[in-house]
Image (cartoon, rainbow, N blue to C red):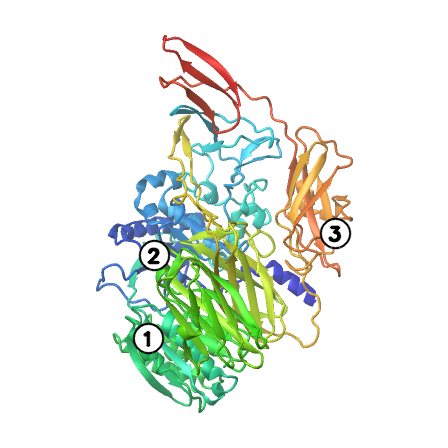
Amino acid sequence: MEVLRIFAFISMLHLVHLAQQSMVQLKNNGYEDIVFAINPNIPENPKIIDKIKSMLTDASTYMLQATKNKLFIRSVKILIPNTWKTNSSYGRPKTESFDKADVIIADPFLQGDDPYTLQYGGCGEKGKYIHLTPNFLLNDRLLRIYGPRGRIFVHEWAHLRWGVFDEYNHDQPYYLSGQRKVEATRCPSSINGLNKVDLCFGTKCEKVDCEYDSSTGLYEEGCLFYPNIEQSVKESIMFAQGLDPIHEFCDKDNHNSEAPNQQNKLCNQQSTWEVIMKSPDMTSTTPLTNTNIPPPVISFLQYRARVVTLVLDISGSMGGFNRISRMYQASEVYIMQIVETGAYLGIVVFSSGAEIKSELVKITDTIQREQLKTLLPKVATGGTNICSGVHSGFEVNKKLDGATYGTEIVLLTDGEDSGISSCFPEVEASGAVIHTIALGPSADKALEQLATMTGGLKLYASDSIDANGLIDAFSGIVSSTGDVTQQSVQVESTTLRVQSSQCLDGTVSIDNTLGNDTFFLVTWDALIPNILLSDPNGKRYVTVQFVSDQFSKSARLTIPGTAEIGAWVYSLCNTHSAEQVLGITVNSRAADGKEPPIVAEAYMNADSASYPSPLVVYAIVTKGLSPVLGVSVTAVIEAQDGKTTTLDLLDNGAGADILKNDGIYSKYFMSYTGNGRYNLRVRVGSNSDKSKLAAPKNRALYMAGFVVNGTIESNPPRPKPSIDNLNLGNFSRTVSGGAFVVSNVPSGPLPDLYKPNKITDLGAVIQGTQVILKWTATGDDLDQGNATRYDLRMSLSSEELVNNFVNATAVNISYITPKPAGSHEMFTFKPENITISNGTIIYFALIAFDEINHSSDISNLARAVLFLPPPPKPKPAPTPTSKPNSAVVISGKMSTIFVFISSLMASSVMVAIFV
């Protein structure tokens, strides 16, 4: 029974919300508190606000129609950046922030104005945010390309809120249907239009019928589908919401299950409407009888200066395990480097009662930071009264303008407090954000509720000195305004137990996006090591140039100006007579306020789990919202007992990772070693030329044009990337992913409850009389380890494989030994009892088994197609222009082309050139 329960849970795993949840509420059919956030780097423009209002009004009406009178938009909050003028009508944010917004308004970093939604999880799971550019909102010429903004918003909302996927495919725009006809990837297949390619002569082009590519059997590269502007169908919003008749989603009656799109792949051939109907939003509502809905209510909130108070535990238990000095060390890092210039910072300490060590101080330069550092506590005594510390923190935060709305508290404690719930009402009413740091195994179990109530971070550090857990936790508490150029970025954080007279050696890469406010922090647990640091030009820094502090057992070097780009080499040598733990932490800020740095974020898909339910680890690597591909991402998860698990996160579209090359790296975690808190830390590294920028996935369809009364009216071509060199070179980042809590882990050896993960990228091609299949190996336990064997089946009917897999024709694959999860697999064979001829379509599906015969779910369906296209029709030659030596180019492909050469004697010669 337990095995059945865990199998069922894994199939529903992606329905779990991510740790950073949206604030949207659904009440009486209306969505309330949708948060829009404008990036502070966007110049002030009141027209952006006007366009958002208009878009939302149209979207609400269109949404009601699309959901069959069930859902609409009731209220929206727009976060105005503090770089815009103040307005007395603007309210103050409470827990709303840019990093938790549902919709962000920001410039693209790489390419174009495609709206898109960042989606982590599988079918039916909510996304993280919708990204719209200012130009998308302001430029009405884009309406012809994407459609009315209200309709686009509903398309993206379906991604964000209901977890459906696009019904087109940028990478595979055409496929061969079961009727042996090449079709555009779309839903429904009854949307009609023309397939055309540009035939150009000099600067003059005309659209001609697409030819077949003999290597694929599909249309040639450059062929585009132009839908008719007038359609007889009303579906689908996830394909072409811009067409006027379209106002519904594809349902089971008109769904195109053959189309090679993400909706079919990730939702097991379910239609978008079937998935939407299963969402809690739809199952919890009934259709409105009165569809005369009011326009959405728009309210405005504006950021003020950042206000943070450190609320630090100095109870007697903090005197053990070196906790008080470690708290001093990490708090010093936060004060000296992490908190942004211009922020207000206060300090409160508490034990049996609370004491205000410093009222709010505005950080303008190093002087204030040094003054605050001297006020950090060094002595631990007394009991634990968490609420007294929180209350005093609120009192400090009020001193700026009389309110706690939008202010922050960083609460660190190692102790239990039976009265912690007594301040829950005050916390809920405060409108403040509380970030909690649990230190050691005995921190109060209710501590995280304070963060949950207020939208704060949940962080944890063990008592292990072999990790920089506490420093990493403080380093992750940065501003949430969306201006990453002002944030401190952790470049490196590493520790090692070093024998006497041995050294911790390494290299830190400062890339060209960083360099300002760079500092190197060296830590030890017994005696300061001998420090040698060399910059990329060979300049050396030694121990005496570092500012050391014996109480915190740390030494800091701040690099003046902008740090040199390249490899910084360090050597920390243990001068103590016994072994000790040595560590180094490196932080820096953006070198240019206009150039966003490469940043990493790390999350678990949930902040708690009950054994044996697995969790998913996610890491996003971006530069200016553009995904970064080709990097090495490693997650280190530390349990409450100090045991660690290391996972290599992948962006390969297999296992826990749903989309390949989207800059989101992921893997399952189920190596539970006990109950209690766990801590996540992620390291990102690039030591080659493989790392590069890419465009986001799930982009709205850039419509090439339309057929109007039989004539194609083209749109401008899609903009090219704004950056020529997309390679990023060497860099590294470390980031804390916060804490999560695990319960119900039994003592003793744990049984094998996890089955191999479903294979989602099975592909098949026919070459001659053979079929070649490729896929990514799954694991013994979900996406880890090695499966034991495969079961491959084929059929001429896709329905047979889906509905009756065990009775489909088996293919002998027994001599294939499964490779480690994430590896590339390939299998070639010659089908028996099937004659491969022109038009043959064979379907394949695959199941993996582990050593105790747990079986994976059936893979995606792969189609092997042999299609020999008819001979190409002659291309009509455009009328020659007066330019000499003008060449005909057909979609940029290798073709038979003609060159017209105008002679000086007014006669012409046609020469055939074969290339």
Q: Rate crowding at label 3 as few (under 14), some (14 to 19) or many (20 or more) other CA atoms within 10 Å.
A: few
- The Cα–Cα distance between marks 2 and 3, rounded to whole angstroms, is 52 Å
Asked if marks 3 and 1 touch (Cβ < 8 Å), the reply is: no
The disc, 2 or 3, on the residue closer to the chain's N-terminal end is: 2
Q: Which residue is mark 3?
A: 817
Percent of width and height locating residue 53: 30, 52
Asked if marks 2 and 3 touch (Cβ < 8 Å), the reply is: no
Q: Which residue is mark 1?
A: 369
Which residue occupies the extreme bottom position in the image?
382
Q: Amino acid at mark 3?
A: Thr
Along the line of sight, the residue nearer the viewer: 226 or 648: 648
Q: Is residue 352 above or below residue 808?
A: below
Q: Amino acid at mark 2?
A: Asp
Percent of width and height locating residue 256: 56, 40
- The Cα–Cα distance between marks 3 and 1, rounded to whole angstroms, is 60 Å
Q: Which residue is mark 2?
A: 592
Q: Is residue 269 above or below residue 414?
A: above
Determine if residue 687 is in view.
yes
Q: Rate crowding at label 1 as few (under 14), some (14 to 19) or many (20 or more) other CA atoms within 10 Å.
A: many
Residue 27 appears left or right of 79: right
Along the line of sight, the residue nearer the viewer: 616 or 282: 616
User: Dot 2 lies on which element?
Assistant: loop
